[in-house]
Image: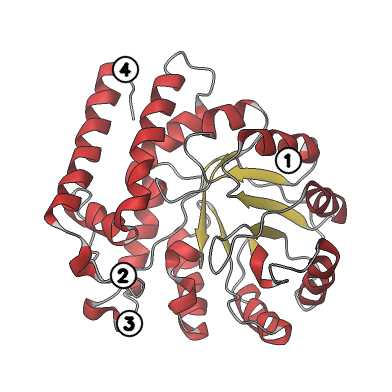
C-alpha cells in the first residue's frame, strides 16, 4: 500500500444540499459548496458523514455525493468518505465497496457500526476486519466516532491497534475530552495515523498536544477562522480565537444542520435551501436566525479587533 499521510488543518464535515422539500439531492449546489469550503481554506473534505444526513440517504445518493465532491474538488484537497449505515456486516461491506470504487483518498468507518453497546473491543475488531477485507488493500482507512445511533469511543488499545495495523490514517475524534485527546495524540505520534478533533473548546490545546487538525461542524460557519487557528497555534492571538470558537460553537446545539444551511445561503450567498431530512426547516425560528446573524457579526468584529487577516 502506498504511504499516505493527510495534511493538518481544517476538514469540514460536509452538508448535503437538497431541492425544495428535500425530495432529492441538489448536486449542483453540492459542487458549489465544495468549492466554497476549498476557497475558504480547508485542507480536506469529509463527505458522506452524519452532517451529510447519511442515515437518510440512499446508497445511490451516497455514491453520487462522493463522485460529485471528488469532481468538484478536482484534486485541490483530499476527500475522504464514509457511507455504511446498515446493520449487517455484509451490507456494510457492499456499501463501503461502492464508496471505495468512487476513488476517495480514504474510506472512513463509523465506529458504532461494528458492535453493539454491550459488545467489547475484540468483537468490534473482528467485525471491523471482516468489512476491511472486502475493500481494496491499498485503500487508506479511518474511523469516525459518530454520535448516532450511539456514540462508541475508541479505547486506547484500539487506537494502538489501528496505528500498528498500517492501513489507518484518520480518526475523527468526538470524545470532547482533552486528556483523552492527549493520550491518543501520544499513541499516534510518529505514525501515519492522525487525530482530528471535532470539538472547538479543546481544539487549540489538542493541537498543541499533537493532534493534527479540526474536523467538525463549525467549519460550515467559520471555515476561514478554523483554518487560521490550525495554522497559527503559537500566535499570541490564538487563545482569543479559541475562546471565541468555544462559545460560538454552542450554536451546534441550536438547530443544526438547518441553521448552517441558512447561514451559508444568507451570509455566504450559496444556492442552498433550508431543506433537510433530519429536521423540519420550519423549526428555524426568527430567534434562531438572529442568533446565527449574531454569530456572524461577533466573529467579524473579533477578527477585526485582533488584526487577523483571513
**Picture layout, residue 139 above or below residue 223:** below
Q: Mark 4 points at which residue?
A: 306
Residue 137 location (% of width, % of height): 81, 69
**Picture layout, residue 70 above or below residue 11:** below
Which residue sits at x=48%, y=17%? 235
- Label 3–label 4 contact, CB within 8 A: no
Front position in the image: 4 or 164: 164
Whichever of labels 4 and 1 marks the residue nearer the N terminus, that label is 1
Front position in the image: 65 or 108: 108
Whichever of labels 3 and 4 marks the residue nearer the N terminus, that label is 3
- The residue tagged with tag 4: helix, strand or loop? helix
Residue furthest out toward the top:
236
| Cα–Cα gap, marks 4 and 1 | 32 Å
Whichever of labels 2 and 1 marks the residue nearer the N terminus, that label is 1
Callout 3 crowding tier (Cα within 10 Å): few <14, some 14–19, many ≥20: few
Q: Which of marks 2 and 3 is in front?
A: 2
Q: Mark 1 points at which residue?
A: 184
- Residue 178: image quadrant is top right
Front position in the image: 265 or 41: 265
Amino acid at each position: 500500500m502506498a504511504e499516505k499521510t493527510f495534511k493538518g488543518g481544517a476538514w469540514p464535515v460536509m452538508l448535503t444540499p437538497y431541492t425544495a422539500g428535500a425530495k432529492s439531492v441538489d448536486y449542483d449546489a453540492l459542487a458549489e459548496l465544495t468549492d466554497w469550503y476549498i476557497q475558504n481554506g480547508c485542507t480536506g473534505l469529509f463527505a458522506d458523514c452524519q452532517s451529510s444526513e447519511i442515515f437518510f440517504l440512499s446508497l445511490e445518493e451516497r455514491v453520487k455525493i462522493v463522485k460529485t465532491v471528488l469532481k468538484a474538488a478536482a484534486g485541490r484537497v483530499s476527500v475522504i468518505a464514509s457511507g455504511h449505515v446498515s446493520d449487517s456486516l455484509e451490507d456494510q461491506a457492499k456499501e463501503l465497496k461502492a464508496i471505495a470504487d468512487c476513488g476517495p483518498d480514504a474510506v472512513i468507518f463509523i465506529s458504532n457500526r461494528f458492535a453493539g453497546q454491550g459488545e467489547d473491543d475484540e468483537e468490534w475488531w473482528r467485525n471491523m476486519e471482516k468489512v476491511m477485507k472486502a475493500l481494496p488493500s491499498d485503500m487508506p482507512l479511518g474511523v469516525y466516532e459518530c454520535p448516532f445511533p450511539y456514540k462508541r469511543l475508541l479505547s486506547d488499545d484500539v487506537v494502538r491497534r489501528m496505528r500498528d495495523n498500517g492501513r489507518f490514517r484518520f480518526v475523527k475524534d468526538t470524545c470532547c475530552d482533552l486528556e483523552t485527546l492527549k493520550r491518543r495524540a501520544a499513541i499516534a505520534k510518529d505514525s501515519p495515523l492522525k487525530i482530528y478533533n471535532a470539538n472547538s473548546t479543546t481544539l487549540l490545546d489538542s493541537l498543541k498536544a499533537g493532534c493534527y487538525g479540526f474536523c467538525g461542524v463549525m467549519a460550515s460557519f467559520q471555515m476561514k477562522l478554523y483554518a487560521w487557528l490550525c495554522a497559527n497555534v503559537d500566535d499570541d492571538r490564538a487563545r482569543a480565537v479559541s475562546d471565541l470558537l468555544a462559545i460560538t460553537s454552542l450554536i451546534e446545539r441550536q438547530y443544526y444542520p438547518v441553521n448552517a444551511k441558512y447561514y451559508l445561503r444568507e451570509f455566504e450567498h450559496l444556492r442552498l435551501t433550508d431543506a433537510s431530512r433530519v429536521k423540519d426547516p420550519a423549526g428555524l425560528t426568527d430567534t434562531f436566525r438572529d442568533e446565527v446573524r449574531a454569530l456572524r457579526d461577533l466573529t467579524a468584529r473579533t477578527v477585526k479587533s485582533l488584526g487577523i487577516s483571513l
